[in-house]
Each structure stands twice: as structure tokens, then as C-alpha cells.
Amino acid sequence: MAVRWNLLILALHLSLPVVLSCQPGFIMLDNKCIDIDECVDIDGNPGSGPCEMYSTCVNTEGSYSCECFDGFSSKSSTQCADINECSTQKDICGPNAECKNTIPHYSCTCKEGFISTAGRKTFGHIDKDTCTDVDECKVDKVCDQNATCNNTLGSYHCFCNPGFGLTSGQSYYTGTQGQCEDICKVDKTICGNGTCHRGANGHHCACHAGFTNYGNNGSRCTALNCDVYKDTSYLRATFPVAHDLVVQLNKSCLELTESEDSTELDGEELLKRLLSVIDNLLSGETFSDNRKVSIFLDLVENTLKLIGPFMKPPGTKISSTHTELQLLLHKGADLPQGAVVLSSMQAQLDMQMETAAGDPSSYPGFTAVSLLSYANLEGSAEGFYSGMKPKGKERFKINSKVVTVSVSNTNTSHLQEPIKLTFNHLEKRNQTHACVFWNSSEEGGTWSARGCSVVESNPEYTVCSCNHLSSFAVLMALYDLKDRFELELISWVGLSLSLICLFICILTFWFIRSIHSPRTTIHLHLCISLFIANLIFLVGISRTENPVGCAVVAGLLHFFFLAAFCWMCLEGIQLFRMVILVFNTNFKTLYMMAGGYGVPAVIVAISALVNAKGYGTDRHCWLKLDFIWSFFGPACVIIIINIFFFLMTVWKLAQKFSSLNPDLDNLQKIKVFTITAVAQLCVLGTMWIFGCFQFEEGTIVMSYLFTIFGSFQGVMLFVMHCLFSKQVREEYGNILSKCCAPRKKTYSEFSSSNSSKAPASKSSHDTGESHI
């Protein structure tokens, strides 16, 4: 028991110091824990305690803290570092001052040309100042007497008064960097080919004879050639409608170049007159002469150059019946810069304004750029390709609108930076294209590819790059059909045989009375139409030297080929009537003539009135490609109508064959007639189906098929309607027997012959039956 008490007393003695000790930051005094003030020194006086520089020690219950001075931030629990306000706070001094870091805080110094609102150059962080601009122009004599001061933000500029300039060529100076002097002495070339005079309002240029500044007396005088506006006898005879305009242009040009103080022209009025003259010239017949095209294009280009500086900036965009024009104008002493784009419905021009302005040393104070697109000039400019170099059997055709590009730059024969022209194609074809310009100086005028290249080309458009200016277009390269000799040989042989066979068919249907009927009348006129069409085709399809005669040949071919389709359609209608009607199944001759020849005549007449120029091409006397549907359209409609009647006929025949009491002999004949007519339609229609594929390259197989079917149509019709007809063969046999073995008949033979022919004449209204 005693041992236990001893152990308990020992444990209490060991634990007593722990129970009576204080927490960190406190000290035991009189058995009480009292806070230790860590911020006093050894002598008990207030101090920084454990805190280092730029901070203040603050005692807390059981501890302490170090609070940094203003402008400093805590680096550790006892250390403080300076804050660089210039880097941490953007624009702390404002937009026109520079910040400088100090310990502590920062200071602000106004930039050159600025001062604080308190009138000080430097201010501190506690100041509410901002830096404002100093108006140096209020200081006397900051600029010389021939200059005007212009205050700027933080500085000033001294601009020379009118009539004065700087020898440095700069537009202003600052401080003592320059002095304004008489502009006529400073810049000896300011007037170009003119005499410089200084006046109260500045300088003005008196141009020498043959030079002009286009009514702007302060601009440089440049050369203007008035000879291009002379009203020559050839010009008067060629383009009489342009006589008045040329006289006015020549008069205005002379006034500009012969007077020292020239007046401005009315650019808007001159432009309207020019477009009116162009409309009058292009609304008539094509020029058909390369000299006329050259005179026309040169006149337009020179007139645009004269009109340009008298337009109102920034220019105009105008269109007329046969033209589209966009003109841009820049005026001012400084040269324009940057890219510019001009466009019309069919073309687009991309070029740099520096290119349009030309040499800065001869800059006349303005820059004009114009793009003029013609609606139908390609017809007059077609065919003049002596300046081109074709490869092999390559031919050319204009496949874009013709455009004229004109600029105020007088030296456009070789541009430092080429222009780009984008042309939309007139015919969307996957052909090779060439970029060309009209060269008036070669052989009276011709298209040439010199200086122009193709940047990009597809079936829709072509992008051209040219290093000179003129009138431009895009040519499409065409190639003669391969195996042309073989195709022509087939055509000549086949058409010759067809003409012979068609002639025999005509004689057969005309003179053999035993087979006369409405159906053979249709066959007769079908053969006559094809005979005349083939004969005209054989003789005149390539006679393109006379445009009027070629157009007549094309019109006749249009008429007779359509007539052949119409007579085929009439046969289909006749067969349908034979199945449907019991009595009066025959057409009246007048109605047949109206349908067979009247309908194609109306179609051709309307086509000629709508587009007379659609007849005749540069290679063949046939319809132009953009006009071909005046034939294919009606032909397709006729074929569809024919097919409809054939289907109705077959349907009615099937009904009649399945009736209770069918007339088998008559129905069998109609059935054979229908089969023959359908075969005939296939023969004639198939030819023109292959003809549709002649508008693309690489169709040599289709060309052979088209030629074979077209050339041997007459032979096929002769076989179907004559050789396959039993009655016609018998008539041929009788004719041959009479010609080969002529003899007198006895009475008995004559009687038997007449009796054998009686049934044939009795059924003559049905025509000869074909057994295929």
C-alpha cells in the first residue's frame, strides 16, 4: 500500500511543471501567463523587433506581425521589398508621361512637347497632375516668315505657304531643320514643260505650246498630241457619225495645248457623246475591216484619256445600249497608292494605282483609270489573226467581250507591274484559251498575244496578265476535226448515192399511178425535201466567202430539213386517221401542203426575223451554235408528236386485232405501214441525235455515225419504200421487161394482163404494201 502512494506522489511531481507552463508568445509571472511584446528592444523601448527595413512591427496576442511601409510589399514574414509601380500599373502616369520608379513610390516626367497641369515637368505619385500638350505655335517665330505653324500633339509642323517650298522636298519642317523658299526656285521641274510663276495664292504654270495641265494651273504641264483627233477624210468616210465628236475633241485639244491659261472641259458631256457614238457604230453592220476596227479602238482609247481628268472624283460607272464603263479618278499632289478593281458584267480589271499614275517625275496631278466593255464588238473584230502563231491546224475564235483599258500614264508600252484581266467566256467550253490585245500597228490591225499570258483558265473564265495597255479579249483555240478527208469522202459518196436513190423515189411516186395515195404523196414530198436539202448541202455547205449567199444556203437547209420532219409527222397522223376513221381517211392536198411546207416556212421566217445573223458561220453555211435550237427545238417537238401518234396507232391496232370481227387484211397493211414509218423516223431522227454530239471535242466516233446516217438517208428510204414494196418491185419488173424485151402483145395477152392488174388498181388507195 505504501509503495502505491509513493508512486502516485512521484507522478504528480513530474507532471506539475507541464500543467503550470505557458503557450508560445506568453511568459509565466506570478503563476500567470502574460503576453510577450516581441516589438520592444532589450531595454523595453518600442522598436522594430524581429522586422527588417521598410516595415513596422505590430505586437499581437501571443505573436507579432510586420507591416510594410507604403510603396513596399511583403517578401517574407519579416522582410519587405519595393514595389515597381511603373511595371505593375500600366499608364500610371497618363498617356503623355514617362514613369520612373523610386524608393519608395515613383515619379512622372512629361514627354517632350508636354507639361503637367500644374506647370511642372515632373510630378510625384501624390500629385493629381496629368501631362497636356504644349502649343509651340504660340511661341513667337517658331516657324519662318514664309511658313505657317500647325500645332500637333507633342510637337508642331511648319508648313510652307503657297508659292514656297523646302529644298529637302519635304512637306513641312520642325525647329531649325529647314526654311521655306520660292517654290519656282526650289523645284525647277514643278511645271514640267511650262514656266513657273509665284503669286499671292501660290504658283501657277504657263504651259508651252503642245503641252497642257488640263485646266489646273498649279499642275505640271505634260504633252498632249492633238493629231490623234484630226478629222481625216478616211475617218469621215468610215465613221460619219463620229465626225462632230472628233471635230469637238480636236478643237478642245488645241485650246488646251495652245493657251497658257486653259479652261476645263465638260467631261460628263463629252463622255455621253462618246458612248452615244459607240452605240450608233455598234448598232449597225459589223465593220468587216481591220482598219476600221483599229480606227474605232484608237479613237475610243484617246478620247477616254482626254476625258478622264475632267471628270469629278472619285469617277463614274455608266452603261449604254452597247457599252459598260467604269472610270476612277484621283486628284491631288500626292501619287495614289494601292490596288484598284474595276469591273463590268463580262470582265474585271485588277491593277495598282502606281502603275496607272506612271513616273512620279512627270505626274500631272491626277490619275485616271477606265475599263470599257463592248456588247457586240467581237463580231467586227473576228477573223483578224495574222498576229497569232497557230500550232498545226489550230484556229481561233473570240470567246469573250472586247474591253478597252485606258490610264492617264502616258507610257503604257511596257508596264513595270502587269495588270490582270478576268474575262467571262461567251461559250462555256473546255478548250485552250489565249489572252490577246488588238495591235493597230501591225498589218492594219490584228489580234496578238505579245506581252500577255494566261494566269488561270477554266470553262467559265480566263485570267490574263499583260504588261501593256490596249484593247483586250480572249481567243478560244479550235482544231479541225480529225479524219476530215475520210469524213468528206464518205459524205460525197453517200450523198451522191442518196441523191440518185431519192431521184428514183421521186420518179417512182410521181409517175407510177398504180401506187398513188395520200401516203405516197407524203413519201414523194419527203423525198423532194431531202433531195433538195442534200443537193444544197453538197454544193453550198462550205461556200462561206459570200456572207449573204452563205446565209441564204443556211436558211434553205433549215427550211428543207424541217420540211422533211414535218412530212414524217404527217405520215404518222395519216396512219392514225386510217386506224380511227372508217370513211374520209385521206388528207386534203391543201392541208398536207400547209403542214409539210407552211409550218417550216413560218419557223424559218420567225427565226430570220429574230436573229438574221444566226445564219452562216465562219466555216459552214449552217446555223450558228447559239442559234442551233431554232432547228433542234422544232425537230424535237415534231418527233415527240410523231411518237405520240405512233403509240396511239399501235394501241388502236391492238384493240382492233382483238375485236370480234377484225378486218385482218386492212389491219395487216396498216401494221406494216406503221412499222415502215417508225423505221423511217428512227433513220432520220438517229442522224440528228448523233449531230447533237458534234459540239464537243473528241467525238470522232459520233462524227462518223452522223456522216454515215446523214449521207445514206436517201439510200435507206429507197430500200424501205421501194425495194421492200412488192407492188413497186412488180412495177419495176414491168418497166424493165418493157425496156429490155419490147414486143407486140396479142389480144389474149392484153386481156389477161388487164384482168391481172384490175385488183391492183382497185386497191390503189392503199399504196404498195411493204413486206419487210
Image (cartoon, rainbow, N blue to C red):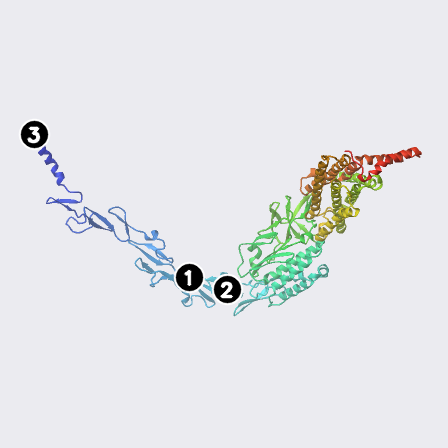
Which amino acid type is shown beneath numbered disc 2? Gly
Residue wearing tag 1: 155
- How crowded pointer 3 is (Cα within 10 Å; few <14, some 14-19, many 20+) is rated as few
Q: Secondary structure at mark 3?
A: helix
Q: Nearer the viewer, mark 1 or mark 3?
A: 3
Q: Which mark is residue 3?
A: 3
Which amino acid type is shown beneath numbered disc 1? Ser
CA–CA distance between discs 2 and 1? 21 Å
Q: Nearer the viewer, residue 261 or 21?
A: 21
Residue 728 figure quarter = top right
Residue wearing tag 2: 165
Q: Nearer the viewer, mark 2 or mark 1?
A: 1
CA–CA distance between discs 1 and 3? 104 Å
Q: Nearer the viewer, residue 28 or 205?
A: 28
Number of residue marks: 3
- How crowded pointer 2 is (Cα within 10 Å; few <14, some 14-19, many 20+) is rated as many
